[in-house]
């Protein structure tokens, strides 16, 4: 729309016609306070805090419901306005308890801030405040009724934003109360959005309440370790006796790829990190058959020596390596480099949750959709998967673009998934009907051809001028090829492939495959890698994960190195098949796999390390170290130490200290002296960074960016915390579609997250609250 | 669908939802008719109405709690609603209410043990010209005095007894 010009506080603003006055002000740096207004939600105009004076209009007007008009002259601060806002606050404080010293929101409360600003410290009200005891509505949601100022943000975000509609308003006028959908408790997705959006401390979380004060925490923005969406979560950490504990997870500054959204896992399921039963020292299986604590040196030397013996006597083909879906890209890359150059084996795999290699091959330079693309999409085709359960961040973006921009959603699924409620058109197909649906959409003869609904679906879809095609792990191999082929016949199409965990995509991209190198380079094209790594690489494809188990059962797998994975539980393997295999495991907990190990190293989790991860949409993001636990080490360090214990040349494994152990710590800055940030800029402009430690993940990121062109994104943007979409430059592989189909979707729900999820007491408590009978028997 | 309502009312509801551009507009009339037939808005009634107009049960409860004339607990066979707004108050509405409380032995919003009468203090019922006024179910009784309200209550009691004797 055309721009209109208006004057606010003497400043001339130009803004598109139809913009709300409050948004026009805010986008020009003029703060207009509001409790009930929230961008993207329906207008409430309940709180009267955003009142402004508009010339030629009677009385004060609410900026949240007034659209800008040409020539409008507005004042947002004046004694009259301050008086009006002060009176509003006085009313709100009429029954609001002054328990700020013990309130969770104290220190980050909008009512507190406004009272501070407008100084409503006196009250004409003499009535006794009505107290109501706080109520627990679910394992994570608590409601403290007298604190509520009735802004209705929670009601709207739950209904409009989440499409859950679990909160409502009962009674009327001053007697209004927020009410949960099951009389005295909530039956909902437990996302915590209502708590996040509450301007005061009326809604508080079971995970955080009465634990600390906001100013006692450090806030570290990092990436959630659970599903494949890669939402930004800000962890509030506080020093404890044995490290830094995570006290809170929230969406503090809404600057991430997830916008306003965070689900229960990103918000509350960090609690595994604080568990008492975490491994904090290495364990070695002693002669008596028991796993017993050992010193780091003992454990490392023992593991390194045994692996070296096995490699030297039986060859690398007798050793297997299983990587993780939750370690960083640098760790995944380092692990396969370690496997291929030090262990001399291609027997490396991970739990595959989507067929990324086939996707990369099918894309062949075509555009992949970033999660950010869904926020502005005009049309989306969702094939398979249930994003509400498995990709809540994506589901939020889809709902948001349907609601706010009228995006059209096309759903084809074998289940009645919740997102159908947003769909313009949907078709239900049999579980094995996806290939035939794609054939039908592509105009080929197919089983669904006679179906009128499917015909209408196809017709509407083909009319779209741009389309995001997003598909679940129902699509593998040739089905992906066929889908991308069909999609490419449509204009302006982008594709997205949905896999399950925080870095499943990175694990695949970084070459945790027996037949593919980083960037899906086939083994036959190993030249650049061999040159860069200074080692001859094994030429034959290795064993995949099930084959490794088969080999172990036959007695052909002498050693297995498992990093951050629990394959014994995931693949329901019989523990006895590993009895003759020397098993080294790195994990946080004594998992089903770790229990069988000969050596266990206590590992840090994703919240306790730095590096990068790639979400399932190919958005590369920086992970920052937030928490710490005495006794644990990042997987990166453990791999390097194990290589050292095997007497490998670790300078070849990680590029550090290549010019001796001297690096530029600032003495050479000259004009940049005293400016650490500018020094960093200067160093990267000179292609230099001080790499003095073998445990420096960014030394490996350098190497990844050199050898995997897709990852060669602007480094400074990445380090500044901005998500970077991968370049469409993954190496082409000829036979991707015909590889063995080993994809095993995790089938996680909103409240499960693989093995890791079972260590989150929040997730467990929600599950138990929902199914009291089943879990009691468990 | 299986319904809690009489065939006539169910048919009326089927039609009601088609009369508005959006189904949920039928919510308030539907609640009133259902309350008249069932006596109050029970949990099963709320569930059925939520389904009929396509909103959540919570939303139906929100609306019910907004309107004081909608109730979720059974009322007496004769629901006595005494007005105490300004005109009635000036002409003795509060005395009428107090008299009813004493006479029936129940507080405001109470129901007699035999389930015959329930009592409620209400806002203006639009009978100011004939204040003080009360409404029993849908019937108006005007220019009340303690004596005349006794008579009114007596008539309803007799009517109920006669009905029971039949």
Image: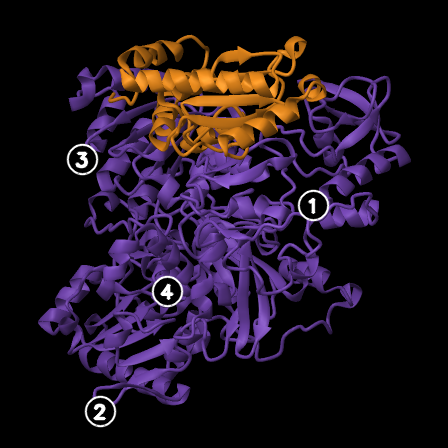
Chain colours: A purple, B orange
Does the image show residue A462?
A: no
Q: Quadrant of residue A163?
A: top left
Q: Which mark is residue A95?
A: 1
Tell me how far mark 3 sits from mark 1, CA to CA: 59 Å
Check if mark 3 and mark 1 are on a common chain.
yes
Dot placed on the residue nearer the N-terminal end, 1 or 2: 1
Q: Chain of mark 4?
A: A
Return the residue at label 3.
A432
Dot placed on the residue nearer the N-terminal end, 3 or 2: 2
Q: Which mark is residue A759?
A: 4
- SS at mark 1 in the image: loop
Query: Could you say where residue A362 lies in the image, as x and y percent from the top left?
Result: 31, 38
**Disc 2: CA contacts within 10 A as few (<14), some (14-19) or many (>=20):** few
Query: Could you say where residue A111 lies in the image, as x and y percent from the top left?
Result: 71, 46
**Disc 1: CA contacts within 10 A as few (<14), some (14-19) or many (>=20):** some
Work out which residue is located at the far front of the displayed protein and give it. B147
Of badges 1 and 2, nearer the viewer stands 1
**Disc 3: CA contacts within 10 A as few (<14), some (14-19) or many (>=20):** few
Tell me how far mark 3 sits from mark 2, CA to CA: 51 Å
Tell me how far mark 1 sits from mark 2, CA to CA: 69 Å
Q: Chain of mark 2?
A: A
Return the residue at label 2.
A287
């Amino acid at each position: 729309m055309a721009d209109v010009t208006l004057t606010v506080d003497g400043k001339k603003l130009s803004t598109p016609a139809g913009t709300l006055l409050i948004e026009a002000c805010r986008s020009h740096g003029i703060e207009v306070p509001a409790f009930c207004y929230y961008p993207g939600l329906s207008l409430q105009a309940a709180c009267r805090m955003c009142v402004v004076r508009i010339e030629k209009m009677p009385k004060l007007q609410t900026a949240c419901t007034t659209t800008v008009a040409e020539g409008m002259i507005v004042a947002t601060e004046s004694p009259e306005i301050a008086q009006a806002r002060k009176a509003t606050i006085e009313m709100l404080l009429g029954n609001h308890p002054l328990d700020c010293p013990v309130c969770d929101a104290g220190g980050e409360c909008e009512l507190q801030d406004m009272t501070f600003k407008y100084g409503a410290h006196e009250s004409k009200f003499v009535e006794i405040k009505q107290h109501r005891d706080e109520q627990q509505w679910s394992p994570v949601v608590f409601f403290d009724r007298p604190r509520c100022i009735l802004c209705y943000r929670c009601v709207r975000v739950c209904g409009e934003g989440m499409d859950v509609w679990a909160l409502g308003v009962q009674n009327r006028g001053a007697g209004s109360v927020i009410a949960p959908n099951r009389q005295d408790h909530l039956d909902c997705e437990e996302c915590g959005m209502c708590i996040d959006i509450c301007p005061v401390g009326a809604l508080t979380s079971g995970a955080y309440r009465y634990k600390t004060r906001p100013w006692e925490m450090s806030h570290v923005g990092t990436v959630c370790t659970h599903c494949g969406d890669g939402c930004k979560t800000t962890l509030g950490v506080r020093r404890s006796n044995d490290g830094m504990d995570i006290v809170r997870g929230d969406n503090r500054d809404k600057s991430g790829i997830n916008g306003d959204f965070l689900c229960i896992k990103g918000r509350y399921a960090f609690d595994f990190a604080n568990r008492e039963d975490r491994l904090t020292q290495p364990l070695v299986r002693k002669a008596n058959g028991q796993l017993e604590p050992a010193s780091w040196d003992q454990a490392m030397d023992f593991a390194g020596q045994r692996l070296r013996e096995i490699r030297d006597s039986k060859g690398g083909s007798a050793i297997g390596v299983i990587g993780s879906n939750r370690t960083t890209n640098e760790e995944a890359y380092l692990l396969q480099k370690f496997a291929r150059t030090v262990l001399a084996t291609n027997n490396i795999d991970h739990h595959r949750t989507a067929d990324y290699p086939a996707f990369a091959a099918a894309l062949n330079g075509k555009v992949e959709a970033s999660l950010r693309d869904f926020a502005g999409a005009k049309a989306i085709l969702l094939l398979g998967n249930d994003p509400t359960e498995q990709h809540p961040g994506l589901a939020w973006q889809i709902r948001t673009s349907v609601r706010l921009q009228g995006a059209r959603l096309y759903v084809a699924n074998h289940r009645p998934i919740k997102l159908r409620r947003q769909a313009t058109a949907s078709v239900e197909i049999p579980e094995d009907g996806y290939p035939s649906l794609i054939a039908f959409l592509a105009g080929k003869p197919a089983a669904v051809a006679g179906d009128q609904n499917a015909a209408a679906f196809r017709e509407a879809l083909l009319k779209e001028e741009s389309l995001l095609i997003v598909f679940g792990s129902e699509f593998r191999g040739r089905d992906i090829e066929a889908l991308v082929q069909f999609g490419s016949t449509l204009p302006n199409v982008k594709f997205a492939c949905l896999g399950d965990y925080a870095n499943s995509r990175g694990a695949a991209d970084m070459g945790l495959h027996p037949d593919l190198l980083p960037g899906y380079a086939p083994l036959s094209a190993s030249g650049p890698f061999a040159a860069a790594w200074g080692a001859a690489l094994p030429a034959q494809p290795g064993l995949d994960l099930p084959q490794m188990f088969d080999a172990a059962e036959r007695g052909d797998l002498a050693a297995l190195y498992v990093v951050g994975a629990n394959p014994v539980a995931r693949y329901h393997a019989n523990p006895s098949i590993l009895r003759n295999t020397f098993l080294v495991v790195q994990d946080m907990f004594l998992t089903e796999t770790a229990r069988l190990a000969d050596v266990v190293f206590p590992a840090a989790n994703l919240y306790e390390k730095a590096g990068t991860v790639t979400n399932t949409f190919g958005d590369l993001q920086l992970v920052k170290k937030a928490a710490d636990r005495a006794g644990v080490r990042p997987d990166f360090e453990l791999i390097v130490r194990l290589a050292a214990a095997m007497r490998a040349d670790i300078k070849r494994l990680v590029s550090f200290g290549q010019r001796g152990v001297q690096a530029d710590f600032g003495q050479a800055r000259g004009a940049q002296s005293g400016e650490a940030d500018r020094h960093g800029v200067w160093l990267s402009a000179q292609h230099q960074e001080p790499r003095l430690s073998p445990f420096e993940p960014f030394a490996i990121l350098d190497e990844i960016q050199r050898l995997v062109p897709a990852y060669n994104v602007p480094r400074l943007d990445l380090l500044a915390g901005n998500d970077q979409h991968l370049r469409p430059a993954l190496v082409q592989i000829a036979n991707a579609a015909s590889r063995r189909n080993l994809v095993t979707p995790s089938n996680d729900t909103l409240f499960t997250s693989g093995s890791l999820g079972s260590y989150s007491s929040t997730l467990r408590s929600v599950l138990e609250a929902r199914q009291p009978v089943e879990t009691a028997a468990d | 669908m299986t319904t809690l309502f009489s065939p006539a009312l169910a048919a009326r509801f089927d039609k009601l939802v088609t009369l508005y551009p959006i189904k949920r507009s039928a919510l308030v009339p539907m609640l009133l008719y259902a309350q008249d037939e069932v006596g109050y808005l029970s949990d099963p009634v709320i569930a059925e109405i939520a389904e009929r107009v396509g909103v959540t049960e919570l939303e139906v409860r929100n609306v019910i709690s907004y309107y004081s004339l909608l109730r979720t607990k059974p009322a007496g066979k004769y629901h006595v609603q005494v007005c105490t707004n300004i005109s009635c108050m000036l002409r003795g509405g509060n005395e009428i209410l107090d008299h009813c409380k004493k006479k029936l032995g129940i507080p405001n919003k109470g129901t007699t043990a035999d389930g015959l009468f329930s009592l409620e203090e209400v806002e203006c019922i639009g009978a100011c010209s004939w204040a003080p006024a009360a409404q029993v179910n849908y019937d108006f009784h005007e220019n009340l005095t303690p004596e005349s309200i006794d008579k009114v209550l007596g008539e309803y009691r007799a009517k109920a007894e006669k009905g029971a004797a039949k």
